Image: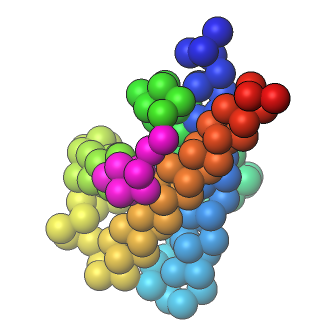
């Protein structure tokens, strides 16, 4: 029962954190620091046909995929932290580990985007900032949810 509760809280925290991260990513795009949202590039590569061509619905599918990935990562974090108070730097480290392993690992391996070290300067800066925001919001949201539950149990 506790495991399911931690997963669900983590998933909710992941959704909130993904929304906050998306604001950073959109601001980075609007500032001209990166062309196209990485989740859209990933979805484009997964859809049939040539991955470099725009496809109908890829923006919405990219947003859903990003939310799904963020919720899943949050659920895993909730499971790992087991309802304990989590310092924000732990959440930031978790999120940056996801970013580095993805953007230096499977994403360039599948030829979706270049690795961080070879990318245009703007995208890595925006993505690093977005993941810092994700990790911070994830930890703070989980702490809030866990505190609410412990207080409710004390009544």
Residue 136: % across, % down: 48, 59
Residue 152: % across, % down: 78, 32
Nearest the viewer among 81 and 149 is 149
Left or right of 139? Residue 119 is left
Nearest the viewer among 36 and 14 is 14
As drawn, the residue found furthest toward the front would be: 155
Tell me the quarter of the image containing the N terminus: top right
- The residue located at (18%, 68%) in the rendering is 117
Tell me the magenta residue range: 85-93
Residue 71 visible somewhere in the drawing: no
As drawn, the residue found furthest toward the bottom would be: 31
Give above or below for 56 relative to 126: above
Give above or below for 27 relative to 99: below
Residue 105: % across, % down: 24, 45
- The residue located at (59%, 81%) in the rendering is 27
Q: Is 150 covered by the magenta stretch?
A: no
Occupied quadrant, residue 30: bottom right
Q: Main secondary structure of the magenta part?
A: helix
Left or right of 41? Residue 141 is right
Left or right of 106? Residue 28 is right
Residue 57: % across, % down: 73, 52
Number of labels in the image equals 0
Nearest the viewer among 108 and 128 is 128
Give above or below for 101 relative to 55: above
- The residue located at (29%, 81%) in the rendering is 121
The chosen color scheme is rainbow
Residue 128 visible somewhere in the drawing: yes
Tell me the quarter of the image containing the C terminus: top right
As drawn, the residue found furthest toward the right would be: 155
Occupied quadrant, residue 33: bottom left
């Amino acid at each position: 029962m506790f495991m399911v509760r931690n997963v669900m809280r983590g998933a909710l925290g992941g959704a909130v954190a993904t929304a906050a991260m998306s604001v950073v990513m959109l601001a980075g795009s609007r500032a001209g620091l990166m062309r196209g949202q990485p989740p859209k590039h990933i979805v484009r590569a997964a859809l049939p046909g040539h991955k470099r061509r725009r496809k109908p619905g890829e923006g919405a599918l990219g947003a859903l995929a990003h939310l799904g990935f963020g919720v899943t990562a949050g659920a895993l974090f909730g499971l790992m932290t087991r309802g304990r108070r989590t310092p924000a730097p732990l959440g930031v480290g978790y999120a940056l580990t996801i970013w580095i392993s993805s953007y230096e690992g499977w994403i360039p391996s599948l030829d979706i985007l270049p690795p961080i070290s070879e990318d245009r300067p703007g995208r890595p800066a925006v993505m690093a900032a977005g993941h810092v925001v994700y990790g911070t919001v994830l930890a703070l949201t989980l702490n809030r949810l866990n505190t609410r539950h412990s207080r409710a149990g004390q009544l």
